[in-house]
């Protein structure tokens, strides 16, 4: 019997090596640097709760009971581009959007410069005129020309840098932007591409919106900016930019759940962007996500238990709990996402790069597999399969 077990073990190892070598035979763009830009105003959960209580005490008879969502959400602090006093007054859509443009450009420039020069990740500085394309992702404000054009006027990008703005993908935007950057680098293996996610959710707050959805959104959402440098396979092999193993992208999957337009998103009214946030999201995650993931991994000849790192967008505590229930994960698999949620809240599309940065800083080992996942309006799912590799 012992011999049978040994043969089974050898066969298992051999099959995994075949799968891994097959994956290595393909072009595999890699994520070589990730940065974040932190807005200036840090507000604790208790401070936010006090502001909300004062604003909504006359609108909800059971305000004390409703405020328990702040403690139950397990968010300790968040960062905003405006001070807490700003929320006590009403603001026009025009005023809020002008602030969105101003702070998006300032923080976007900061995130890009940090991403291209971070010595923790890169062996050398990358100059902005070496960047072939910018994927700009946002859902919390509008601008035409888009924010990437404003930033190109602040930094010395080549005038021929391709601009690919993506709007309206919400919390799924970071995953969708990474997927599109991956596809670009598949087509152009010598390319260096930036993914910039800017979400200033505080500026969408509507003081006169007395729906419970507004309370839930106020307890969750925050401001954040993040940037990633994705490079094609020829850059990885030729320039050896990375100091340690980095996540190569082995494949992606985008999925839309039909007839789910009312699950998450914005309603645009005279005051700006009004949040749509269904109470059914955790249930949808628990019932819909696992079959979606299993289909994706099956196509890649990967089993769920082979995933060592769960790079998940932390939509909220209930969403993270649903991830665990759906996938049979213990708390350790969602710990990094929970830490980001605790310290920064839900920053919509930008959040998943905060989580990815933590994983890349921790330094998974050569050959480790990761699953990157984000859910957003539509209702939609973005999945990416990652493998950490040396640049050799």
Image (cartoon, helix red, strand yellow):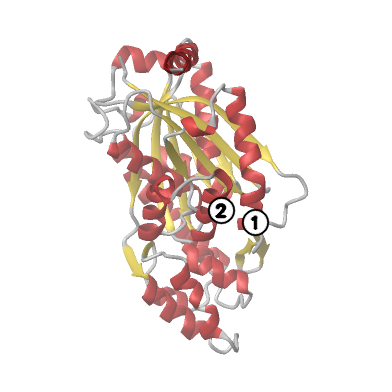
Coordinates of residue 333 in the picture (x, y in percent):
42, 45
Determine the residue positioned at 61% across, 33% down. Answer: 294
Which residue bears the numbered disc 1?
283
Q: Is residue 25 above or below residue 147?
A: above
Picture disc at residue 166: none
In screen coordinates, is 292 left or right of 185? right
Coordinates of residue 250 in the picture (x, y in percent):
50, 23
Q: Quadrant of residue 45?
A: bottom left
Q: Earlier in the sequence, mark 2 or mark 1?
A: 1
Label 1 packing within 10 angstroms: few (<14), some (14-19), many (20+)? some
Q: Are marks 2 and 1 in contact (CB under 8 Å)?
A: yes
Looking at the rendered structure, the secondary structure element under dot 1 is helix
Which residue bears the numbered disc 2?
322
Q: Quadrant of residue 366?
A: top left
Q: Is residue 383 above or below residue 391?
A: below
Distance, label 2 to label 1, CA atoms, is 7 Å
Residue lying furthest front: 1
Label 2 packing within 10 angstroms: few (<14), some (14-19), many (20+)? many
Coordinates of residue 140 in the picture (x, y in percent):
53, 55
In screen coordinates, is 127 left or right of 206? left
């Amino acid at each position: 019997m012992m011999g049978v077990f040994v043969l089974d073990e050898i066969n298992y190892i051999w099959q995994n090596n075949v799968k891994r070598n097959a994956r290595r035979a393909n072009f595999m763009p890699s994520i070589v640097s990730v940065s974040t830009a932190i807005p200036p105003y840090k507000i604790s959960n208790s401070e936010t709760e006090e502001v909300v209580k004062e604003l909504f005490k006359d609108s909800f008879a059971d305000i004390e009971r409703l405020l328990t969502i702040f403690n139950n959400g397990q968010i300790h602090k968040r960062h905003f581009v405006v001070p807490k006093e700003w929320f006590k007054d009403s603001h026009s859509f025009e005023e809020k959007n002008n602030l969105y443009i101003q702070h998006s450009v300032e923080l976007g420039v900061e995130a890009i410069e940090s991403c291209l020069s971070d010595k923790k990740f890169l062996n050398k500085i990358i100059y902005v005129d070496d960047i072939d394309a910018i994927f700009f992702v946002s859902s919390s404000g509008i601008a035409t020309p888009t924010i990437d054009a404003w930033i190109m006027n602040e930094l010395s990008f080549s005038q021929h840098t391709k601009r690919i703005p993506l709007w309206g993908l919400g919390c799924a935007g970071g995953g969708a932007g990474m997927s599109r950057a991956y596809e670009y680098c598949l087509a152009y293996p010598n390319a260096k591409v930036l993914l910039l996610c800017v979400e200033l959710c505080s500026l969408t707050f509507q003081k006169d919106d007395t729906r419970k959805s507004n309370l839930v959104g106020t307890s969750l959402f925050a401001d954040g900016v993040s940037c990633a440098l994705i490079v094609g396979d020829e850059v990885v092999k030729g320039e050896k930019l990375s100091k340690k193993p980095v996540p190569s992208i082995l494949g992606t999957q985008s999925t839309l759940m039909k007839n789910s337009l009312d699950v998450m998103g914005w309603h645009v009214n005279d005051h700006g962007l009004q949040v749509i946030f269904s109470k059914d999201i955790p249930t949808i995650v628990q019932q819909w996500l696992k079959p979606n993931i299993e289909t994706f991994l099956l196509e890649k000849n990967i089993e769920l238990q082979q995933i060592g790192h769960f790079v998940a967008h932390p939509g909220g505590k209930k969403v993270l709990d649903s991830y665990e229930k759906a996938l049979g994960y213990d708390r350790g698999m969602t710990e990094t996402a929970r830490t980001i949620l605790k310290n920064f809240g839900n920053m919509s599309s930008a959040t998943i790069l905060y989580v990815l940065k933590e994983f890349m800083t921790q330094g998974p080992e050569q050959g480790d597999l990761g699953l990157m996942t984000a859910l957003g309006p539509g209702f939609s799912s973005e999945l990416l399969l990652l493998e950490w590799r040396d640049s050799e």
